[in-house]
Image (cartoon, rainbow, N blue to C red):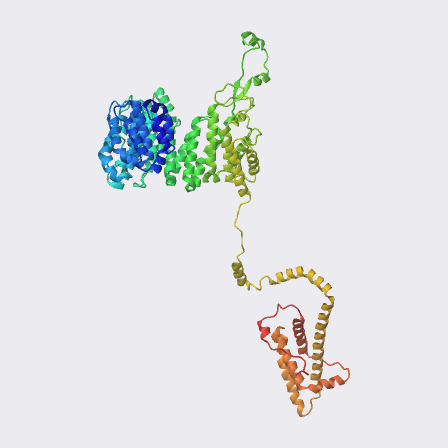
């Protein structure tokens, strides 16, 4: 508030002080002093009231034009900062401003200031509907736009851009009130686009106006979409109708379009010459590209693009080249004129195809063969170091990027290799074919007369080299820089993976040749020895050393090398190692962009060499299921695992046995004693059985014989079965029954002589089973134990305990 009081008391106290301090006042208003005053004293404070009255007095009709211009500008800043001031003074202000806009004698500066103020009031009125009914109704909007149209059709060039920009900004805000003005707006747009000798600013403004006219179409959303499509088709039809005027109908195979579209109602050409037609085509193509580039408003949504007609037009313009057959009996001067205009037509076609690819994208796949093939064929018609090669190759790379992975690899391989070679040739043009400029031909006396020339009777090759210096033309360096940017896009395209290995190797060799030189990252240029205005020739021996001094050239090489590393081609040939060396040097370069690119490339290279993968975990469930199909998870690989564990555990067990040798010996002695006791008892029982069978005469003999036969039949099956737990149990049961039948025989055998008794065959079968059972009982390993063993009863061998 103090600042506003200070301005009112000093800078705005008189008209002369206002004009002198106007820049300072605008700068203070940009510091939001009006908002601070509202917060301190309220919306209707005395300071803001005095401020509004002072500004209203400046825009009175009786005030001088410079003061009125300053008043409109200060009001514009005040209304932008304070909505309260806008609502309180907007109605009176817009009336005075409209009087300025409708007057034919208004000063251009006052007109532009009043126009910007009215534009702001109308734009803010959309947020205050009740206030807008009285201040900014349909009549006010139509009156304002009519004033803008009249001024745009006038002769004052200073106000035309501002009027056209204001109309374009008001069309989306007030489409319904401005619908009656659609014919006049359409006429204005066509006049600006087709006006001969129009400036670039007027053509741009007319193109923006033509693109926005679809918003005035009736019938809701469908009507808006149909109006947008008709506008695009009308532009295509207009360009198609003007192409024969440029070519003078000299080509025998001029491709005709399948889509015959109605052109716009354009005024006739000034002189009906090919050059005039070409200028109009360039203006129409600019409007068409802007139409494809400008997004539609939200209430319209997506629109239908005439892809077929646009592709046909672009292919037709690009396909017209010097190798197209020409009709017979045509005037050579006409042929020369038409062929000289073809590059400009090709540039128009390239811009259209590139913009169409960016706007549509993958739906262009069905037309990819025609577009890419036509561009590559036209590219091959131009020699090395031609500027058109850069335009055509750039368009090709943009289309290839827009199509992406949806492009058929076979379609890409037909033309990609050809374009790729042309790009490499454009890059190497600064190195392979350097331009040499001769030194001064003046003699020693500075006159260079005929006398000195006559004295040179012999030719010395060293003198010719000493008097020449390498130089790089501006066009060659610009073509090389464009080619490097194109090469980067081609390397990043999915179709680049299908290139021949030799072409990938050539690319890596060229980039490494340019980047591995010690002077590539030099921050100090070489001493100049030429008077070139663009890039001075130096004392370098080749043009590459001069090209390396260009920051754009070096950045392009580093970007292309980074894209080549991401492609992954020729990784085994040492490309990545040499590229890493280039980027390590680039990290120390003076150019910040090159330094950033090098650091980023090194970071991405580490991920290429050592890819970051998620941790791999074994699927134990799958392994168990697979083992169970073979024969059980527990039975597969157990023997190998046990053997490996035994070998690993063996040294520890030996060491442990040495430390506790006494305990180990005691355990072994107990096991041996148990085995010997079992064998001794079995032999004794066998002897007793044989003795009782021999002495079994009388009544009891037959019975004991039957008992022995019964025992034999019981024990005999165990000899043919496997020596498992069940077989050992049957053997022990039979022996136990024999002991109960003839206990006295055992005692008699102990007292008898040392005669050896025969051992039956079934005992030989029983002994291994008993030995295995004893070993199982005395051993430390429990791997043969199972649930069946735990369920079996305990067998006691000692008969005295029973």
Who is closer to the viewer here, 606 or 736?
A: 606
User: Image quadrant of residue 413?
Assistant: top left
| Residue 131, image x, y percentages | 25, 38
Who is closer to the viewer here, 31 or 148?
A: 31
At horizontal 62% and vertical 63% (from top left) the residue drawn is: 639
**Is residue 261 found left or right of 638 in the rendered image?**
left
Who is closer to the viewer here, 30 or 606?
A: 30
User: Image quadrant of residue 579?
Assistant: top right
Quick check: 273 above or below 227?
A: above
Whether residue 237 appears in this view of the structure is no
**Is residue 120 found left or right of 586 in the rendered image?**
left
Whether residue 701 appears in this view of the structure is yes
- The single residue placed furthest to the right in the displayed view is 753
- The single residue placed furthest to the bottom in the displayed view is 699
Quick one: quadrant of the N terminus?
Answer: top left
| Residue 711, image x, y percentages | 64, 82
Count of numbered circles on the image: 0
- The single residue placed furthest to the top in the displayed view is 451
At horizontal 23% and vertical 31% (from top left) the residue drawn is: 143
Quick one: quadrant of the C terminus?
Answer: bottom right
User: Image quadrant of residue 276?
Assistant: top left
| Residue 501, image x, y percentages | 52, 38
Quick check: 200 above or below 508?
A: above
| Residue 180, image x, y percentages | 22, 34
Quick check: 97 above or below 725?
A: above
């Amino acid at each position: 508030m103090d600042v506003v009081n200070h301005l009112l008391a000093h800078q705005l106290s008189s008209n002369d002080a206002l004009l002198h301090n106007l820049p300072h006042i605008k700068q203070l208003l940009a510091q939001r002093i009006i908002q601070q005053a509202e917060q301190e004293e309220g919306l209707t404070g005395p300071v803001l009231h005095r401020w509004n009255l002072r500004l209203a007095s400046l825009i009175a009709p009786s005030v001088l034009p410079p003061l009125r211009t300053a008043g409109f500008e200060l009001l514009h800043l005040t209304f932008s900062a304070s909505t309260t001031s806008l609502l309180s003074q907007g109605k009176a202000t817009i009336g005075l401003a409209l009087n300025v806009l409708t007057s034919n004698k208004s000063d251009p500066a006052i007109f532009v200031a009043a126009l910007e103020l009215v534009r702001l009031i109308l734009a803010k009125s959309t947020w205050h509907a009740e206030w807008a009914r009285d201040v900014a109704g349909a009549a006010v909007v139509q009156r304002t736009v009519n004033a803008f149209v009249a001024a745009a059709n006038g002769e004052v060039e200073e106000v035309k851009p501002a009027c056209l920009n204001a109309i374009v900004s008001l069309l989306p805000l007030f489409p319904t009130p401005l619908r009656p003005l659609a014919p006049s707006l359409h006429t204005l747009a066509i006049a600006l686009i087709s006006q001969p000798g129009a400036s670039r600013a007027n053509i741009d403004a007319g193109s923006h106006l033509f693109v926005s006219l679809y918003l005035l179409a009736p019938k809701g959303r469908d009507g808006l979409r149909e109006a947008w499509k008709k506008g695009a088709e009308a532009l295509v039809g207009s360009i198609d109708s003007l192409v024969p005027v440029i070519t003078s109908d000299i080509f025998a195979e001029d491709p005709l379009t399948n889509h015959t579209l109605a052109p716009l109602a354009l005024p006739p050409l000034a002189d009906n010459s090919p050059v005039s037609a070409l200028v109009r085509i360039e203006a129409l193509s600019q409007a068409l590209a802007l139409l494809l580039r400008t997004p539609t408003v939200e209430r319209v949504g997506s629109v239908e693009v005439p892809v077929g007609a646009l592709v046909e037009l672009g292919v037709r313009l690009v396909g017209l080249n010097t190798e197209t057959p020409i009709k017979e009996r045509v005037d050579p001067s006409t042929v020369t004129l038409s062929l000289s205009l073809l590059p400009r037509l090709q540039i128009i076609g390239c811009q259209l195809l590139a913009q169409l690819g960016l706007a549509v994208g993958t739906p262009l796949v069905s037309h990819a063969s025609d577009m890419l093939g036509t561009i590559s064929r036209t590219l091959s018609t131009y020699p090395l170091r031609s500027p058109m090669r850069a335009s055509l190759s750039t368009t090709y790379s943009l289309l290839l990027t827009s199509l992406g992975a949806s492009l058929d690899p076979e379609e890409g391989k037909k033309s990609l290799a050809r374009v790729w070679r042309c790009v490499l040739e454009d890059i190497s043009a600064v190195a392979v074919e350097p331009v040499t400029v001769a030194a001064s031909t003046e003699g020693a006396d500075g006159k260079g007369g005929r006398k000195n020339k006559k004295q040179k009777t012999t030719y010395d090759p060293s003198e010719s080299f000493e008097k020449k210096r390498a130089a790089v033309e501006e066009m060659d360096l610009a073509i090389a820089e464009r080619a490097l940017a194109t090469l980067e896009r081609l390397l990043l395209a999915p179709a680049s993976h299908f290139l021949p290995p030799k072409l990938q190797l050539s690319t890596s060799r060229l980039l490494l040749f340019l980047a591995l030189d010690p002077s590539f990252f030099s921050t100090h240029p070489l001493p100049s020895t030429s008077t070139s205005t663009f890039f001075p020739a130096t004392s370098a021996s080749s043009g590459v050393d001069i090209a390396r001094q260009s920051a754009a050239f070096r950045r392009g090489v580093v970007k292309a090398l980074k894209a080549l590393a991401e492609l992954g081609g020729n990784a085994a040939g040492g490309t990545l190692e040499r590229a890493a060396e280039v980027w390590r040097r680039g990290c120390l370069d003076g150019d910040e962009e090159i330094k950033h690119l090098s650091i980023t490339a090194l970071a991405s290279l580490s991920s290429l060499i050592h890819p970051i993968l998620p941790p791999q975990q074994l699927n134990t469930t799958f392994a168990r299921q697979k083992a169970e199909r073979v024969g059980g998870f527990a039975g597969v690989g157990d023997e190998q695992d046990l053997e490996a564990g035994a070998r690993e555990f063996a040294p520890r067990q030996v060491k442990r046995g040495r430390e506790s040798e006494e305990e180990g010996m005691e355990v072994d002695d107990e096991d041996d004693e148990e085995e010997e006791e079992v064998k001794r008892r079995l032999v004794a029982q066998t002897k007793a059985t044989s003795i009782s069978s021999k002495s079994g005469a009388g009544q009891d003999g037959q019975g004991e014989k039957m008992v022995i036969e019964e025992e034999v039949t019981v024990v005999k099956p165990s000899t043919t079965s496997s020596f498992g737990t069940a077989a050992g149990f049957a053997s022990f049961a039979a022996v136990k029954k024999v002991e109960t039948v003839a206990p006295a025989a055992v005692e008699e055998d102990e007292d008898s002589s040392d005669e050896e008794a025969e051992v039956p065959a079934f005992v030989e079968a029983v002994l291994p089973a008993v030995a295995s059972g004893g070993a199982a009982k005395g051993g430390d390993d429990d791997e043969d134990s199972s649930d069946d063993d735990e369920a079996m009863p305990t067998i006691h061998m000692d008969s005295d305990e029973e």
